[in-house]
């Protein structure tokens, strides 16, 4: 896909709502040209793509970042089973239809990455290429994901902790500013611990059985250089208003997703693909992730490149906007 380079652009991001897949979705968009759809993760919003919107627009693309289902100004359905991967991919198809685009390139970070990968897997006729940030495509495993969650006498895996409705909500919402600062700092490449240390521990993101998740975290005295207090306030304002239930419901469908994806087991992603991650990202410390990344081209045969950014943590496009923008634009110009 080749976009015409724009000599100048004066308009900044604009906001709009569209009806898609039975919900009202908030979009932030900038630019004109071929569509690039940007899917955020947990616990974030369309704001996480603020550095990419202008860069893509300047390069001649139409960049669109939704508040995903359950987040920001987008609808938050109450039933847990309304947050499956099929719902989330369906939302993105609906965005293309609402914007009157036959095809798009889809990019996703964190939880948005599985949405992007599965959109490309299930609808290659609508998504001509895919960019995954932080999380690679993970083929369907032989058994329910929850059966492999680590646990000890004193702690459980964070995804297990997220399963009981109301428990994690109360924990994360007790002090939203602290939660936001702690999540963004602790997951970054600037935190004193690293994915290497997590690997030595044998697991990541374990939650004490007593006290909950946030009781074990520390409010940073200073933010990393890529993050401002104003950035933090955007997320704080959003989650104070919405709470965390919508985002947590994504985790509550992990086993259901495994069941729903049974008909597509073994299916390969056939469109061009790019993976970008940081070498200090805790996701890379998950058990078996080294093998998944090393063998990614078996499931994604048109994988063009795997870019691992030194010193970068989990918040890939926010921590390293210039490198991410350059890699995305190089990929977009080649497809």
Image (spheres, grey):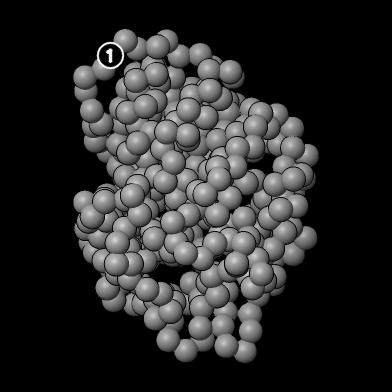
- Please state if 124 lies on the left or on the right of 300 as rendered: left
Residue at 54% from the left image edge and 62% from the top image edge = 194
* Rendered position, 328 above or below 197: above
**Residue in front for this viewpoint, 293 or 16:** 293
Residue displayed at 60% across by 42% down: 308
Horizontal side of 24 relative to 141 (left or right) equals left
Q: Quadrant of the N terminus?
A: top right
Residue 247 image position (x, y, % from top left): 41, 60
**Residue toward you, 310 or 250:** 310
Q: Residues within 10 Å of mark 1 (few under 14, many from 20)?
A: few
**Is residue 330 or residue 1 the one in the foreground?**
330
Which residue lies at the image location 34% right of the left edge and 77% below the top edge?
170
Identify the image quadrant of the C terminus: top right
Residue situated in front as seen by the camera: 48 or 313: 313
Q: Is residue 146 visible?
A: no
Establish if 151 lies above or below 15: below
Quarter location, residue 3: top left
Left or right of 15 on screen, residue 303: right
Judge whether residue 195 can be spotted in this image: yes
Q: Which residue is mark 1?
A: 8
Q: Residue at x 34, y 20 (%)?
A: 58
Using the image, determine if residue 51 lies above or below residue 99: below
Q: Residue 230: x percent and y percent?
A: 21, 51
């Amino acid at each position: 896909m080749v976009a015409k380079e724009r000599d100048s652009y004066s308009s900044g991001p604009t906001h709009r709502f569209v009806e898609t897949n039975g919900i009202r979705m908030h979009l932030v968009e900038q630019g004109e040209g071929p569509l690039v759809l940007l899917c955020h993760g947990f616990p974030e919003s369309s704001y996480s793509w603020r550095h990419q919107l202008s860069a893509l627009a300047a390069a001649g693309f139409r960049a669109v970042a939704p508040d995903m289902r359950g987040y920001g100004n987008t609808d938050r359905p109450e039933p847990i089973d309304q947050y499956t991967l099929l719902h989330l991919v369906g939302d993105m198809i609906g965005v293309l239809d609402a914007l009157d685009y036959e095809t798009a390139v889809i990019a996703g970070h964190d939880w948005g990455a599985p949405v992007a990968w599965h959109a490309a897997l299930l609808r290659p006729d609508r998504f001509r290429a895919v960019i995954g940030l932080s999380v690679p495509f993970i083929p369907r495993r032989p058994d329910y994901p929850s059966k492999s969650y680590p646990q000890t006498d004193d702690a459980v895996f964070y995804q297990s902790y997220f399963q009981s409705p109301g428990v994690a909500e109360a924990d994360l919402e007790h002090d939203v500013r602290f939660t936001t600062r702690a999540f963004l700092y602790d997951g970054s490449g600037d935190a004193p611990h690293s994915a290497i240390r997590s690997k030595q521990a044998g697991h990541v993101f374990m939650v004490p059985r007593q006290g909950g998740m946030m009781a074990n975290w520390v409010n940073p005295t200073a933010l990393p250089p890529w993050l401002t207090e104003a950035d933090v306030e955007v997320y704080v304002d959003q989650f104070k208003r919405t709470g965390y239930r919508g985002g947590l419901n994504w985790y509550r469908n992990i086993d259901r997703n495994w069941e729903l994806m049974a008909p597509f087991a073994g299916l390969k992603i056939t469109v061009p693909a790019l993976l970008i991650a940081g070498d200090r990202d805790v996701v890379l410390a998950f058990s078996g992730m080294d093998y998944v990344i090393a063998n990614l081209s078996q499931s994604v045969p048109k994988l063009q490149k795997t870019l691992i950014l030194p010193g970068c943590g989990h918040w890939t496009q926010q921590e390293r906007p210039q490198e991410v923008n350059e890699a995305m634009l190089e990929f977009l110009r080649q497809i």
